[in-house]
Image (cartoon, grey):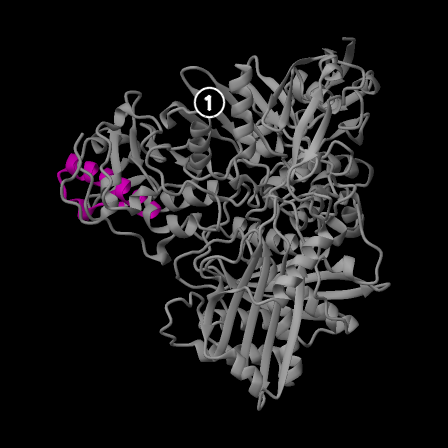
Amino acid sequence: MPTFQLKINGASHSVEADADTPLLWVLRDNLNLVGTKYGCGIAQCGACTVHVNGNAIRSCTTTVANAQGMEITTIEGLSENGDHPVQEAWKDIDVPQCGYCQSGQIMTASAFLENNSSPSREEIRSAMHGNICRCASYNSIEKAVEVAAKKMN
Amino acid sequence: MKTSNKISFSRRSFLQTSALASGGMLVGFNLFTACKEDVKPPVDLSLLDYNDFNAFIKISDEGKVTIFAPNPEIGQGVKTSMPMLIAEELDVAWEDVHVVQGKLDTKNYTRQVAGGSQSLRQGWTPLRQTGATARQMLVNAAAAKWGVSASECKTNKGVITNANGDKLGYGEVVKEAASLEVPENVTLKDVKDFYIIGQDISNVDIDEIVTGKPLFGLDYKQEGMQYASVLRPPAFGQKLESFDDTNSRAVNGVNDVIKFGDKIAVLASSTWAAMKGKKALKATWTQDSKAESTAFHDETLLGLLNGDKFDTRRKDGDVKKAFAEADQVLERTYETPFVPHNCMEPMNFFANVTTDKIELVGPIQTPAGTAGQVARMLGRDASEVTLEMTRMGGGFGRRLYGDFALEAAEVSHLAKKPVKVIFSREDDMAAGIYRPAIKYRIAASIKDGKLTGYHLKEAAINGNMYGLIPNFFPAGAIENYQVDTANYKSNITTGAWRAPYTNVLASCEQSFFDEIAEAMGVDRIKLHMDLLDKVKGTTDERIQYSPERLQGVIKKVVKESNYGKEKDVYQGFAVYYCHNTHVAEVADIIMDNGVPVVKKVTVAVDCGIVVNPLGAKNQVVGGVIDGIGHSMYGEITFNDGAPQSNNYDSYQLIRMLQTPQVDVHFIENDIAPTGLGEPTLPPVGGAVANAIYKATGKRLTKMPYMNNMDVEPVVG
C-alpha cells in the first residue's frame, strides 16, 4: 500500500492506504479521528464535512491522494478546548438530539462564518441546506449559527 | 447490609444500598422490575456490577453524585431527563451530578427499551421514589450523628441541616447512610418545590458531541477487530444461488469472505476495504417468493378495502343504518407509502463471540431482546452475553430490530474474530424494516346537520393498528362508529416507525375532518369542540384521551397561531392524541410558484409536567419537522421486490430550506408527565394538507403530497 503524508489539525501523519480511499475512512479507521461521520458516502448529507485549506468539503468523496499536502481540520481540531464560537453556540442553544450529524453541521457552519461574518437568516438557511439532520434540529441549527456569528464579531 | 422486611410498597424491595470499598455509597435499584411485586432482591449488592440492577446512584465522599441512566439514548433525551427525576428528589444541585449510560440488565429487566414514548411516563414515580429514598437515608444518618430526630432535618442541594443550625454535606454521611435500613416511607416533593424538574437542562453529552468524541456505535473499535460489509439479496423474496469471491479476495485489506445464510460477509482491515470487497463480489440470486412491486401493493390494498374480509376492532351503534338514513355520506380513500427510517448513523454492531463469552456493543433500542436472540441463534446461554449500549445516531424504530447485531454475532462466530458489521447507506436503505404502505377508507354520515356515523377501514401490509388505537378520537364522540382492519402479508420486511400507524392515520383522519366540517357548513374548531363535549364523563375505559385536555390544546393553538385571522398565509388545523399526549397544530403555508412552502407551525402540547423544557421543545420541533418531511417527500417504491431508492440522491429527506419555524406552547399543569418522542409527528401532515387545500382547493389524499401535486419533485 502506498504511503501518504497528511497534515491534520496542525500535525503531520503518515498513513498507509490505497490511493482511492476516501479521506473519511482514513480519518476514522487509520487515525482514530471518529468525530467525522459517515452518512451517505456520496456527498449528499454533509455528516463527513471537514475543512481543507479553510473550505468545507465532503471527506467521503475526497480521496486520501487528493488530500495530501492540504491543511485539513476536523471537528477534533476545530478548537483546542471545544470552545470555538460555533461549538459554544451549539452548547448555548442545546442543538443536538441524537447528535450524529452535528460535527458535520458545525464544520459547515464554521467555514461558512469565516467567509460571511454577518449572514442573513436566508444566507444561513442556504449555507446549511446541504447538511441533513434526521432528528430535524434545523430550527436550533439556524439559531445557533446566528448566535455563533454574533460571538465571532 | 440489611434490607427491610416490612415492605410498605413493592418498590422498596428493589432498592439496596452498599458502602463502596473506594468510599461513598451505592444505591442500586431496578427501575423496571420495581413495578412488580414478587421479585426477590439479590443477596449481596457489593458483589454485583450491573447485572441485577439497571440503575444506580453513586454518592462519593465528596458528595458528588453519579447516576447511571438505564434507558437507551436515541436522541429523545432520556439520558438527561430520567436522571433529572432522581436528582430532584435526592435534592442535589444538577451541577454536582454526572450521568453515565447504564449497561444492559439481562436478568431482571422488563422495560429497558427506547420506544413508544414511554420512558418518562413509566419512570416518573419509581425514579423519584428512588431519589427520595436515598435522600432519606442520608438524612437519617445525619440525624443519628447529631442525636436529633430525622424529621427535624432538612436538605437543600446536597446539604443537610437541623434546627440547631448544624450542617453536613451528603459526602460526610454516605458511609453511615450506606449501612442503614432502607426506609419504608418516603415523602416526595411538591411540584412547587421542584428546582431541577421544569428547568432547561442541556443534553448531558453535549460537550462530547460538539467536540467529536467517540460516542456512537460506528465509533467503537477493538484491537484485532474486522470490519465487515455484508452483501444481502438485492430484492425481497430472493435467495443466494452461487457466488464468486475471487475479485473480492484480491482487494487490498480484505482478509476473509464468509457466506452465512443467503448473505456474504467481506471481512477486512478497514471499512473502505470491506466496502470495496463487497462491491467486487459476484453473486447470482433466485426468486424464492413473490417479487412484489408498488403497483401490486396499491392494487392489493385497494382490493382489500373494496372487499369484505375485515376484522372489526371497535363497533358502536350501527354505521350501516346511520349511512342508510343519512342526508349525506362522505367517503375518501387515503394512501400512504412505504418509508425507510434513514437513521443518520447507518446500522452497525460489534460482536466478539468466543468459546466462553459473547460480547456485543452497539446502538440498539432493545438491548435485552437482542441479547436473547443472539444467545438463542448461537445455542448459548443468555448469561454468557454482555451487551454494551452506545449512543445511537437516531432510532425512529429501526433500532428496535436487532438484525444487524445478529449478523455481527453470526459472522464473528464463524470467523472466530471480533467483528463489526457496518451497513453502507445503500445497505441501510435497501435492507430496511420499513414503515409499511397503508391505505385507509373513511366514510362519514351527516343527518339533520349532525355527524351521525363514522366508519374507518384500514388495509395495511403485514400488520394493523394495534392496542387502543381504534379507541382514539373520534371514538366515543360519534354514536355510530366502526373501525375495521385488513391485511396483506408481504415478504418485504416492515416494522415500527416513529409513532407506528398513527403517523399516517392522524393526518388522514384530520384531513377528513376538514371535509366533514366543510360539508356540514360548520367551523372546523367548533366541530371538534362539540364532539369532545360529548365524550366528557365517559365511562368507556377504552377511551384513553381526555376530552378536556384535547379541548385545552385546541384553544391554546387557536389563540397562539391566530388561527383563521392570519392574512397572507393559508392555515390548516389538526388535533390528535397518541402516546398518552395531547397535541394540536396549525400549519401556515404560502404558495411559491405553485409550490406549497410551510412557513410556520404552531403547536400546543399537553404532556403534563414538562420535565426538561429545553429537551422537550427539541422533541416537539423535531417531531413536527420530521412529520412534514415524510408527509411531503417520503416514499420508497419497489420494482420486482427491489427498493427503488438507496441513497440521498434518490430519496428526499427534509432539509433546512424546506423547514418551517416551529412555535411550541406547553399547557401548564401538575399532571404526571407523558412522552414526547412521537406524539407531535402524526397530526402535522393533516395540518399541512388542510392548509394546502385552502391555498389550492385540492384535497391531498395520497402521500407524499409533493409527488401528488402538479409540481416538480424535489431531491436535494
Asked if residue B166 shows in the view, the reply is: no
Amino acid type at circle 1 is Glu
The image position of residue B226, as x and y in percent, is 60, 17
Residue matched to label 1: B359
Helix, strand or loop: magenta stretch: helix
The disc numbered 1 marks a residue on which chain?
A: B
Q: Position of residue B415 (x, y in %)?
A: 56, 15
Q: In the figure, B295 relative to B573: above or below?
A: above
The boundaries of the magenta stretch are B127-154
Q: Nearer the viewer, residue B447 or B290?
A: B290
Expressed as whole percent of the image width and height from the top left, the position of residue B9 reads 21, 49
Q: Is residue B381 visible?
A: yes
Q: Residue furthest right?
A: B593
Label 1 element class = strand
Q: Is residue B325 above or below residue B121?
A: below
Q: Residues within 10 Å of mark 1 (few under 14, many from 20)?
A: some
Q: Nearer the viewer, residue B364 or B622?
A: B364
Q: Residue B715 location in percent, x, y?
A: 80, 48
Task: Please say whether residue B143 is one of the residues in the magenta stretch.
Answer: yes
Q: Please tell me whether residue B509 is drawn above or below residue A71 in the rendered image.
A: below
Residue B681 is covered by the magenta coloring: no
In the displayed structure, does residue B196 sit left or right of residue B566? left
Which residue appears at 29% of the width and 52% of the height? B188
Q: Quadrant of the N terminus of chain B?
A: top left
Q: Quadrant of residue B592?
A: bottom right
Instruction: Identify the residue at image location x=53%, y=45%.
Output: B76
Q: Quadrant of residue B219?
A: top right
Query: Residue A14 sits in which quadrant?
Result: top right
